[in-house]
């Protein structure tokens, strides 16, 4: 960890480009941001934790045990940093705009997982959306998609 801190202070972000282990740095970054969305209101629920694991499993097409391992690795990385900038930057540079919009949708899904959207969650996701270079239409679409997936809004003929 000391070497990572020294590299960061020197501005040598290339030291962060690769990740030891079975996971790409950008995947760890997504998982860490999902965990931050879970932790930000200081009320990490079992529903939110299950959502993080499920979303990583489904989004990255992982087996259950592999998704759980990714959560553990990301949780360790998250505990090592002082700021989420490192993770947001890895997502911004590691994914195209459509992929970043989908990742923002996943973040909203975690925030909605416990049925309560805390102000801290909303502020975090709005800040991350800006860091991911997403425009207002993409941000609104991500939020609406997450709400629909979570059953918070209904769509279809039964709405009439």
Image (cartoon, grey):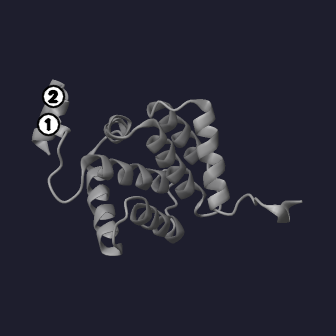
Q: Neighbour class for label 2 at 10 Å: few (<14), some, many (≥20)?
A: few
- At 50% from the left and 31% from the top, the residue drawn is 130
In the figure, 64 relative to 71: above or below?
below
Decide: few, some or many residues near mark 1? Use Cα within 10 Å; few <14, some 14-19, many ≥20: some
Determine whether 24 is above or below 152 in the image.
above
Q: Which quadrant holds residue 59? A: bottom left
Classify mark 2: helix, strand or loop.
loop
Q: Residue at 51% across / 42% down in the picture?
A: 101
- Say whether residue 117 is visible: no
Q: Is residue 158 above or below residue 99?
A: below
| Location of residue 91 in the rendering, given as x and y in whole percent from the top left corner | 36, 41
Q: What residue sits right under mark 1 in the picture?
A: 15
- Left or right position of 61 against 38: left
Residue, far right: 160
Residue furthest to the top in view is: 11
Image point 15% across, 39% down: which residue?
A: 4
Q: Position of residue 155 (x, y in %)?
A: 76, 59
Q: Percent from the top left, x then y, of residue 143?
A: 62, 46
Q: CA–CA distance between discs 1 and 2?
A: 6 Å
Q: Secondary structure at mark 1?
A: helix
Which of 19/7 is in front? 19
Residue tagged 2: 12
Q: Residue at x 18, y 25 (%)?
A: 11
Residue 148 lies in quadrant: bottom right
Can you tell which mark lies on residue 121?
none
| Residue extending furthest toward the left | 3
Q: Is residue 15 visible?
A: yes
Callouts 1 and 2 close, C-beta under 8 Å: yes
In the depicted view, which residue is nearer to us: 66 or 86?
66
Q: Quadrant of the C terminus?
A: bottom right
């Amino acid at each position: 960890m000391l070497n990572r801190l020294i590299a960061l202070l020197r501005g040598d972000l290339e030291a962060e480009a690769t990740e030891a282990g079975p996971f790409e740095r950008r995947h760890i970054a997504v998982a860490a941001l999902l965990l931050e969305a879970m932790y930000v209101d200081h009320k990490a629920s079992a529903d939110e934790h299950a959502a993080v694991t499920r979303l990583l499993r489904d989004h990255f097409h992982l087996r259950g045990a592999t998704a759980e391992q990714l959560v553990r690795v990301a949780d360790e990385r998250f505990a090592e940093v002082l700021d989420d900038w490192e993770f947001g930057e890895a997502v911004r540079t590691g994914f195209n705009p459509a992929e970043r919009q989908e990742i923002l949708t996943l973040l909203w899904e975690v925030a909605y997982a416990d049925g309560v959207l805390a102000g801290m969650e909303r502020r975090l996701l709005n800040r991350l959306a800006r860091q991911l270079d997403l425009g207002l239409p993409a941000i609104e679409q991500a939020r609406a998609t997450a709400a629909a997936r979570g059953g918070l809004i209904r769509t279809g003929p039964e709405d009439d």
